[in-house]
Every structure is written in C-alpha cells, then in structure tokens.
Amino acid sequence: MFIDTHAHIFMPEFDADRDEALARAMAAGIELLVVVGYHLEASRKAVEAAQRYPQVYASVGIHPHDAKHYDDAAEETLRKLAKSPKVVAIGECGLDFFRDRSPRPAQVEAFRRQVRLAKELGLPLIVHDRDAHQETMKILKEEQAEVVVLHCFSGDLAMAEEAWARGYYTSIAGPVTYPKNEGLRDIVRKAKADRLVLETDCPYLPPQAFRGQRNEPAYLFDTANEVAIILGMSLEELGRLTSENARRLFRLPSLS
C-alpha cells in the first residue's frame, strides 16, 4: 500500500468523479492521501475533504502565486484551519520564480511567515520550489525550519544531498517517469532511503503513460513502479519504505 503525500482532489477537475477517483486509488493500492491547500479557499476545501473521506488528510497553506494576499488576517485563518483534527501540515508554501505571479519580496515574506507558523504549531512544512532552489534552501536554513518536505523535487543532486543532510524529505512525482528526466532518476538512485516519499500532485504532472491527461491518485502506482525499478526493490518493499516515511513525516496512522 502507498501514500500519496500531495494531491489536490478538491479541485474542480474532480467534481464529476471524485468518489470514483478515490475508489480507483484504493484499488490501485493507494490507501491514504494528503490533500494540500494553496490559498485560503483551497485550504478550506482540503479540510472539508479530510472531514468527508476517512482516507484523506489535509494541509493548509498559501502558495507563492498567492503570496501577495498573505497578511495577518490570512495567517490567522490558516492558524484556525490548522487546528482541525486531520490537518497534518502547513503548505504548500515557498517560492516560484518561474511564473512570478506574486512579487518576489511578497513570496519571501509569506514563505518565512509560514515556516514560523509551522514551527509554532509543531507541524511539518510542505515546500513548493520552482526556479528558486538557492533562495528556498537559504530561507529554510535562516528560519531554522524543522520538519520539511520538498514537494515534487526539482533541484539537482547537490541540493538533494544538502536537504537530506538537514533531515528534509524529498517527494518524487510523475516526472521521474519522463524519458528525458535522467537527472531525477539519478537523485532517486542516490536518495537517503528514510527521506523519500511519493506524490501525484494531481491533477497536475501525470506519469508518462498518462501525459496530456488529468492526473489522479491511482496513477501514483506508475510513479512507484518506476522508483522501485530504479532502486531495485519490489513494489511491496517500496510501499513499506515510503509509507513508513510518510507516516513519520505527517504523523499519519499505521496502515492495516
């Protein structure tokens, strides 16, 4: 059994078949999911999904795209949402210097404040980092971030090794299956085993077999299969390893 550590099943792309998509995930061996908020309304929907579905847990946060809206009131809303029983993390938050939909100073400020909020609440931090690798690692170090997962890891091996040395987790998504992504496969090959988790980031980033389609939690199986091949493990071994890591990271219940 596997855990999808980063999904967005509350998005409109799943409105027509959300229950069916979750049933397909269960049939494919995905027993638990962490659904991740990226602004206040998405965070509310993540909490609602966790309340509705027993296999779903939630994270609440404000993505760098919406960092320009981060203020004291937004932070207080996140703080209140984070007290819901099935909220297991703060995020996704971080830096996105590729699209720059919020000014970079606003992104940095919102990121720093969410690192502090996670520490205050004793929750892990889900980090979005796109084209901002050095800046992301610098802020995490300066803010003395504690439990961190670098979602959909896209840095190089040196960044991954620094992350593992700090005790951070690296999350592997569908791009590990893309033919030209040998760099990510090499990172998986050299990964610190107890700091590796899996995700879909659905509806985004489907594995190679589903390119051009909506991603969904069941497709985590394809990513897991690729990672198992890279590591020379059986799927059962990889499931145990990555599920143990995800449970430790998010303090999720044991699978049975």
Image (tube, rainbow, N blue to C red):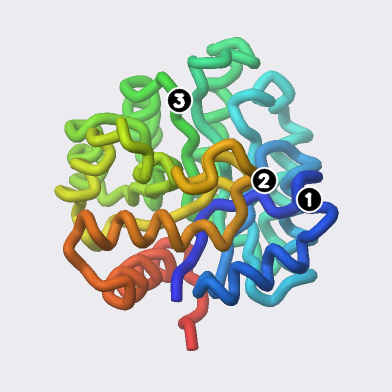
Q: Nearer the viewer, residue 165 or 157?
A: 157
Marks 2 and 1 sit apart, C-alpha to C-alpha, by: 8 Å
Give whichever of discs 3 and 1 has the lower sequence position: 1
Q: Nearer the viewer, residue 200 or 20?
A: 20
Image-quadrant location for residue 232: bottom left
Relative vertical location of residue 107 with respect to residue 150 in this rendering, above or below? above
Give the labeled residue for mark 3.
130
Relative vertical location of residue 137 with respect to residue 255 in this rendering, above or below? above
Could you tell me which secondary element the residue under label 2 belongs to?
loop
Instruction: Give, as a three-letter code, the residue at label 2.
Output: Gly
Tell me the residue at 69%/63% (across/down).
Answer: 21
**Could you classify mark 3 by the number of other residues whose Cα lies within 10 Å: few (under 14), some (14-19), or many (20 or more)?**
some
Count of numbered labels shown in the rendering: 3
Residue 126 percent coordinates (x, y): 49, 45
- Which disc is residue 37 wearing? 2
Q: Are marks 2 and 1 in contact (CB under 8 Å)?
A: yes
Give the labeled residue for mark 1.
44
Tell me the residue at 34%/47% (across/down).
Answer: 170
Residue located farthest toward the front when viewing the structure as drawn: 209
